[in-house]
Image (cartoon, rainbow, N blue to C red):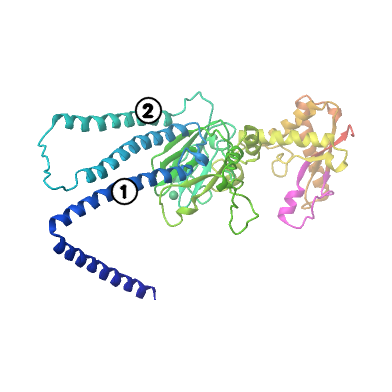
């Protein structure tokens, strides 16, 4: 049906055009060619002037109408320290090209009117004019120089790398089909090295875990935070094809090139909340974010800083969106403290772990912290059940009461705790599973408890504060019905006897 209507329209318009042509021919015959030419020229001239005015007015009205859609205006203000430099470059280019646009537009249509065909007027021929040549070479040269010099200046400011002694946060963004993997440094502030040859399903970034700097690195889940006012340096990499790291609100855009690391340095200057409050002033942003839910969140409430991939990198390109929340330093610190080390939570003990069987500094520190926290709880608690704590990392050679070398770390924590709470008296208890002779088990557990006590007395803890006791298999934690449960029952623990709080 639509096709038929279109066809009919085309036929009708063709007929109209043919008829207009005929009418013109007829009038020309009646009036005479010259007169028609003069009339047409006059009409064309005036129409040119009319078009010039209507078009120019339209340009300025639409520019005013849509000014809030431009970068740097209204709700599209930059949220980073360098953002205004780039926005002002767009402004200068807009102003200069705008002036040229208006002048050439007026000249084009005014000349069409002024020099229309008139009886007896002849064209003037200019073969060559040095003055004109000079003017139209010099003006664009000066304008281009201003733009290029300003541009270079802006590039040098925006792309300036950080000084090594400066305070900044370095994160790493790796693009792959189809997501961004973001890595934060651990408390050491340094990101560990990588080697693509180490890439596995568990270690997608190919992080080198021989490098101690990588042990505390964090690969956060969906939520990504940045502290406001802090310089951020992003290392940008790609694993497969070309991607592009694009944070439009921060005016950050840089290619992620496979095999060639790039970087971008920027400082977020507005928190997500501050930016939302600015958007709130605009009518457009007070519309519902989801049109099907008129009472849901407004657009300004739903606003987030988005990370996108600005390179058409494949079918799933659209799904490379991530959200960066900009928050205060305190909120950032609170979030950061909750993040787990990628290595300790995902890799430790697996095939990819080159440090299997070794206790690492970072674990010793972490366990010491946990030990002192649970010790504090146990001392302060009034509940009898909380007074018994396991010595999870204290182990003995098979079938003997000799402590393994790595047991010293936790025993040293216990020494520290005994010195922190000088009135503490504890019972050190050894437990076994139900395999073997009960009497032998009792004996072994007693010897093991004594080994622990000896370790403590050797380090200056008074023997009067320590009661070693071997319980053998008499106090299992869980029924001795599987290897796993038996392992749980073979344990060393201690109980705070006094002071009872
Ligand atoms: Cu991409």
Disc 1 from disc 2: Cα separation: 43 Å
Q: Is mark 1 within 8 Å of ligand 1?
A: no
Task: Please state which of the two labelled residues, at mark 1 or mark 2, is closer to the viewer.
Answer: 1
Mark 1 vs 2, N-terminal side: 1
Is 19 drawn above or below residue 270 in the view shown? below
Q: Is residue 215 left or right of residue 464?
A: left
Q: Secondary structure at mark 1?
A: helix
Q: Is residue 482 left or right of residue 41?
A: right
Is 47 drawn above or below residue 194 in the view shown? below
Residue 208 appears in the figure: no
Q: What is the number of the mark on residue 50? A: 1
- Residue span colored magenta: 471-492
Locate the C terminus and report the quarter of the image it occupies.
top right
Q: Is residue 85 left or right of residue 458?
A: left
The quarter of the picture where residue 134 lies is top left
Residue 474 appears in the figure: yes
Q: Secondary structure at mark 2?
A: helix
Q: What residue sits 32% from the left and 74% below the top? A: 8
Say which of 294 and 218 sits in front. 294
Residue bearing the label numbered 2: 153
């Amino acid at each position: 049906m639509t096709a038929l209507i279109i066809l009919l329209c085309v036929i009708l318009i063709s007929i109209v055009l043919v008829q207009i042509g005929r009418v013109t021919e007829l009038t020309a015959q009646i009036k005479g060619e010259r007169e028609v030419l003069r009339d047409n020229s006059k009409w064309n001239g005036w129409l040119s002037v009319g078009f010039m005015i209507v078009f120019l007015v339209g340009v300025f009205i639409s520019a005013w109408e849509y000014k809030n859609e431009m970068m740097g205006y209204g709700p599209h203000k930059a949220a980073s320290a360098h953002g205004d430099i780039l926005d002002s470059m767009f402004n200068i280019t807009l102003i200069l090209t705008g002036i040229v646009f208006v002048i050439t537009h007026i000249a084009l249509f005014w000349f069409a009117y002024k020099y229309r065909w008139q009886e007896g007027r002849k064209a003037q021929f200019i073969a060559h004019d040095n003055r004109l040549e000079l003017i139209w070479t010099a003006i664009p040269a000066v304008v281009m120089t201003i733009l290029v010099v300003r541009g270079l200046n802006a590039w040098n400011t925006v792309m300036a790398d950080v000084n090594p002694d400066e305070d900044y946060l370095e994160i790493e963004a790796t693009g792959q089909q189809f997501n961004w993997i973001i890595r934060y440094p651990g408390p050491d502030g340094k990101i560990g090295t990588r080697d693509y040859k180490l890439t596995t399903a568990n270690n997608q970034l190919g992080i080198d875990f021989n490098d101690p700097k990588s042990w505390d690195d964090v690969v956060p889940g969906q939520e990504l935070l940045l502290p406001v006012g802090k310089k951020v340096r992003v290392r940008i990499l790609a694993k497969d094809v070309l991607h592009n790291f694009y944070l439009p609100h921060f005016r950050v855009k840089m290619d992620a090139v496979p095999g060639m690391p790039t970087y971008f340095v920027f400082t977020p200057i507005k928190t997500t909340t501050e930016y939302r409050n600015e958007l709130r002033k605009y009518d457009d942003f007070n519309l519902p974010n989801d049109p099907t839910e008129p009472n849901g969140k407004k657009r300004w409430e739903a606003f987030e800083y988005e990370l996108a991939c600005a390179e058409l990198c494949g079918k799933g390109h659209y799904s490379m969106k991530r959200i960066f929340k900009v928050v205060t330093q305190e909120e950032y610190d609170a979030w950061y403290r909750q993040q787990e080390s990628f290595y300790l939570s995902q890799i430790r003990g697996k095939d990819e772990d080159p440090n299997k069987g070794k206790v690492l500094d970072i674990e010793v520190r972490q366990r010491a912290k946990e030990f002192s926290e649970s010790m504090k709880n146990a001392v302060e608690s009034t509940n009898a059940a909380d007074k018994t704590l396991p010595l999870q990392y204290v182990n003995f050679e098979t079938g003997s009461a000799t402590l393994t070398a790595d047991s010293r770390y936790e025993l040293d924590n216990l020494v520290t705790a005994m010195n922190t709470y000088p009135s503490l008296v504890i019972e050190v208890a050894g437990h076994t599973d139900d395999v073997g002779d009960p009497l032998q088990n009792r004996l072994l557990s007693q010897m093991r408890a004594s080994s622990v006590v000896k370790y403590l007395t050797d380090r200056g803890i008074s023997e009067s504060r320590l009661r070693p006791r071997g319980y053998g298999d008499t106090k299992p934690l869980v029924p001795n019905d599987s290897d796993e449960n038996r392992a749980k029952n073979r344990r060393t623990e201690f109980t705070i006897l006094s002071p009872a709080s």
